[in-house]
Image (cartoon, rainbow, N blue to C red):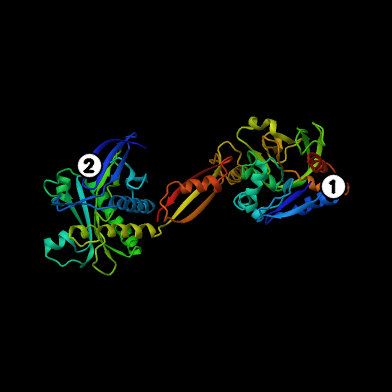
Amino acid sequence: MKKVKLIYEGKAKRVYSTEEDDKFIIEFKDSATAFDGLKKAEIQGKGEANCAISSKIFELLTIKGVRNHYIERLNEREMLVRSVKIFPIEVIIRNRVAGSMAKRLGLEEGRKLEKPILEFCYKSDELHDPMINEDHISALGLASPEELITIKDTSLKTNQILIEFFKLCHLDLVDMKFEFGKDSSGEIYLADEISPDTCRLWELGTTESWDKDRFRRDLGGVEEAYNEVKKRVLETPVESKTRILIRLKQGILDAQGSVILNALKSLGFNEVLEVRVGKLLEIKLDRKVDEAGRIERMCKELLANPVMEDYEWEWIEE
Amino acid sequence: MNFGIVVFPGSNCDRDCYYVIKEILNQPARFIWHQETDLNGIDCVILPGGFSYGDYLRAGAIARFSPVMSEVKEFADRGGLIVGICNGFQILTEAGLLPGALGRNKGLKFICRYVSLRVERNDTPFTTEYRRGDIIRMPIAHNEGNYYIDNPDKIRNQVVLRYYGENPNGAIDDIAGIVNERGNVFGLMPHPERCSEKILGSEDGLKIFKSIVRAL
């Protein structure tokens, strides 16, 4: 897949159109900004780290049944995604008091919240992304009430999945930011990136930052933090299950199927027209490796005999 | 003239082959355990019948990963003679050394009996002792002998044996045995080693082994 045209350049990413209308390429940059662009820097290796972290997390979310825009990682800095139109809303979800919420409400950072808090901001650099509520969103037509329900449900579900995942990385997911988009058929996808630029991550059991706050607050060790999160995320196994169905190709006589067909008919099930018998395999995987096409290869190289069998597979959502 | 008989876990016709070669034809033969990788001095490799790896997944599917099989492939590339009998034939198709695949018998039953075969080619190293068109009788004993290939025309010239009179398992084009394009790898569902001595009721299979000895 080739990049065709730069269609958007943000603080940390470039988005390109491709030869296919329904796919974009996202390129992760090393540059970082904070405080609405007042603070700028290049952070060596950040682009690669965020690309790797986001890819793995999107793969995890796909396995867990969260529809997202990720298709595959193309190289160290680029990922292929579904082209979606981004809602002009930032969704923030908080599990602990930190950042702007601590400042706004005069609370101490670190306090655990009784339940996750969802906040919405209107995406606008000039206005500094002001906070809005659900009424603003529907009254201004930023998203329909049904779309907003999907966005809220997906945010809460994703939050639960990622709290658990980051715990395995020995990280505490304090808060994070989501963006959503919809495709030409109106289907809603979790989009953008999920990385230390969009999540506040603390060493489990402490308030030590492993995210962009190291840059915002001049805590030092910025590059190391991105690399450390990348290392932990990539090394943490994601157990997933896949279901593989293998059948004789159409056109090959399925003798078992015909015998079963006759048996069903003799029981009076005359509506049965055809029976095809196959093999079902459930495979549990440790997806430390984020290479695409591994299951395809398993099917082609061993599980199915391509001369006489067809296969299909799917992730088993938990 | 040295025969090597590969023994997989679950092979059960290895000793019959050994007996025919050693006792009837007085030729040197040795067993090759599937984990060995030394085919030095071997002129003909036999993959015998049986149920390698319990026929798990598909008959022959797992055996092709045995260490010996990469050597067997190189042996084939060098032009060495290879015969796969029954499960050995299944292994050769799974390993890609012969085209096509062997599926479940059409009647869903394990078939163990004599069948009639027609010799379609006598110009292979495995069949020179026959005449073209000979009708011979050999026993079959298999559950997956239903040979399938999507385009049988493509291998029309590679068919060595066809079921004659009656097709026991549904094999496409009545195919019972084929060679590869080069003609040095032969796979067949019938068991020639079970009909190589008069006392067993037939000697029709012995000519296969005799042909190989002559070729070498």
Residue B137 coordinates in the image, percent (x, y): 81, 40
Q: Is residue A79 left or right of residue A113?
A: right
Looking at the rendered structure, the number of numbered marks drawn on it comes to 2
Chain letter of the residue beneath label 2 in the structure image: A
Report which residue position mark 1 lands on.
B25
Residue B192 in which image quadrant: top right
The quadrant of the rendering that contains the C terminus of chain A is bottom left
**Between B210 and A250, which is closer to the camera in this rendering?**
B210
Residue at position x 71%, y 34% in the image: B159
Three-letter amino acid code at the position of disc 2: Glu
Q: Give the x, y percent position of residue A100.
A: 15, 59
Q: Pointer 1 indicates a residue of which chain?
A: B
Seen as rendered, the residue at the extreme bottom is A205
Residue drawn at (16%, 67%), measured in percent from left and top?
A108
- Which picture quadrant has residue B122? top right
In the image, residue A85 above or below residue A219: above
Mark 1 is surrounded, within 10 Å at the Cα level, by few (under 14), some (14 to 19) or many (20 or more) other residues, namely: few
Q: Secondary structure at mark 1?
A: loop
Name the amino acid type tagged 1. Leu
The CA span between labels 2 and 1 is: 80 Å
Q: Secondary structure at mark 2?
A: strand
Q: Write down the residue under mark 2.
A: A9
Residue B59 in view:
no
In the rendered structure, the answer to whether residue A153 lies left or right of residue B37 reads left
A312 or B195, nearer to the observer: B195
Residue B133 spot, x, y in % from top left:
80, 31
Q: Nearer the viewer, residue A55 or B86?
A: A55
Is residue B96 shown to the viewer in this render? yes
Location of the N terminus of chain A by quadrant is top left
Mark 2: few/some/many CA within 10 Å (<14, 14-19, 20+): few
Horizontally, is A226 left or right of A282 in the view?
left
Label at residue A240? none
